[in-house]
Image (spheres, rainbow, N blue to C red):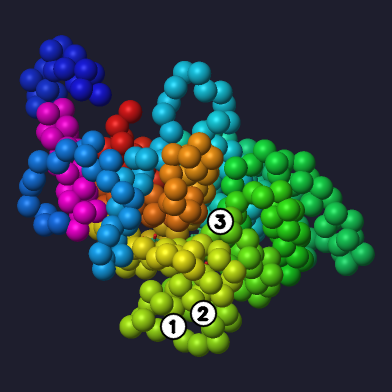
Amino acid sequence: MCIKLVIFILSDSSEFRDNLKLAYSAAVSRRQQFLIRCLGGSTEKKNFNFQSIRMQSVMSSGPSLEAESVSILTSIIPGLESTKHKGQAGKIAVVGGCREYTGAPYFSAISALKIGADLSHVFCTKDAAPVIKSYSPELIVHPILEESYSIRDDEKSSISAKVIAEVEKWMERFDCLVVGPGLGRDPFLLDCVSHIMKHARERNVPMVIDGDGLYLVTNCLDLVSGYPLAVLTPNVNEYKRLVQKVLSSEVNDENGTDQLLSLAKGIGGVTILRKGKSDFVSDGKTACAVSIYGSPRRCGGQGDILSGSVAVFLSWARQCAAKGEVSMNPTILGCVAGSALLRYAASMAFDKKKRSTLTGDIIECLGRSLQEICPV
Ligand SMILES: NC(=O)C1=CN([C@@H]2O[C@H](COP(=O)(O)OP(=O)(O)OC[C@H]3O[C@@H](n4cnc5c(N)ncnc54)[C@H](OP(=O)(O)O)[C@@H]3O)[C@@H](O)[C@H]2O)[C@@H](O)CC1
Ligand SMILES: Nc1ncnc2c1ncn2[C@@H]1O[C@H](COP(=O)(O)OP(=O)(O)OP(=O)(O)O)[C@@H](O)[C@H]1O
Ligand SMILES: [Mg+2]
């Protein structure tokens, strides 16, 4: 990146040169501010040695729950070696998208690609597929799911078998499934999806469960209970419903960490990413937080970016764990990295777009955010 900048500075007009210098110093400053926030320090300018931060342990010691998200991000992002082939950086599948919701699965699947996955599939209803395809030719879209309104009762069992067989063909190729963005709540569709989840679990495919996937799981906890490769990413409402179902109590923010630990333990050691002003992550044994500054805009779809992002980082963290490069639970590492990147990109988008910031603007900032955190 530095070499490219020098070449432009030598060859272009002084106005362009000044703009480039400004853009570069803004990027450096933003990265420094991000590092300071991640380390819980003051926001005064300081000189940081990025490499030394990279070498620190991934979890904070002491009473603070704040995860060292920069260390985590940089330790699991794979290199871009020319020896690698298509697929090695990750193949993600989103199960979601119905008549009402086409944005959510698109946000999740495109975010996975923009972060660095090689292939991103979407399994959605027949109605939703042409719409999602029209948003982007980059996505591989399978129009296989059906909602009750479009089929007769006597067709249900044969259609259900067809849907499951179709997804099953692909299952082993996926590094992670995201289940739920824009899935809807049709009972027949959710029944098919529960079969898909059972197959994924039999094949040890990790699953990030979000949106209506959480509605399904909350009503049928056995789908994920005791599965360590399941990650649940509830928002305020979804968390409340989970707590009521599993712990038979109300959300208690005074003892929030203990309650999150109990919830994750109560579902047999799944990993939970509780979204909010700070994101809290627990697998029932440990808990950590990501509270770096994000954006004050709460436009819909940010949780969908997060689900695609967690899926990619979780896949990369599992690759690192298989090589003995990291020792922490890869699902926790994936959640922390996904949350930190989303918040960083949201902050960058808000800097530029202010009140008009939308989810698409945040997605556009994913690449530059990664570059500032972990330059290629
Ligand atoms: N473009 C698309 O296609 C998108 C599609 N999406 C898809 O929509 C589906 C349903 O997901 P969801 O998030 O709307 O459902 P859920 O959490 O039950 O909220 C329902 C209602 O609860 C409220 N509410 C929400 N947050 C709250 C809070 N913090 N604190 C207090 N109240 C809060 C709020 O109601 P209100 O404020 O009107 O009372 C909200 O309307 C799911 O498939 C998802 O993936 C989304 O991903 C977005 C982009
Ligand atoms: N009050 C907040 N302050 C700062 N960041 C927040 C706040 N609430 C949520 N976020 C961030 O936004 C992300 C999405 O969380 P949110 O609660 O909006 O999910 P969601 O409701 O599932 O979103 P979606 O609209 O995609 O369904 C979280 O990762 C979190 O980092
Ligand atoms: Mg959501």
Res 244 → quadrant: bottom right
Look at the numbered disc 1 and give the secondary structure of its residue. loop
Cα gap from disc 2 to disc 3, whole angstroms: 18 Å
Q: Mark 2 or 1 closer to N-term?
A: 2
Which residue is pictured at 31% across the width and 45% down the height?
Answer: 71
> Is residue 286 visible to the viewer in this orientation of the structure?
yes
Is 24 covered by the magenta stretch? Answer: yes
Percent of width and height locating residue 234: 49, 67
Q: Is residue 205 magenta?
A: no
Do tag 2 and tag 1 residues touch (Cβ < 8 Å)?
A: yes
Real-space CA distance between mark 1 and mark 3, rounded to the nearest whole angstrom: 22 Å
Residue lying at 50% horizontally and 88% vertically, measured from the top left:
249
Work out whether mark 1 precedes mark 3 in sequence or the reverse, and give the earlier one.
3
Of 108 and 224, nearer the camera is 224
For disc 1, the marked residue is: 251
Question: Residue 294's quadrant in the figure?
Answer: bottom left
Residue matched to label 3: 208
For the point 17% across and 38% down, which residue is it? 49
- For label 2, the crowd category at 10 Å Cα-Cα, with few meaning under 14, some 14 to 19 and many 20 or more, is many
How many other residues sit within 10 Å of disc 1, few (<14), some (14-19) or many (≥20)?
A: some
Question: Residue drawn at (63%, 38%), measured in percent from left and top?
Answer: 140
**Residue stretch in magenta:** 19-40
Name the outermost residue toward the top.
11
Q: Is residue 34 left or right of residue 259?
A: left
Question: Badge 2 is on which residue?
Answer: 243
As helix, strand or loop, the secondary structure at mark 2 comes to helix
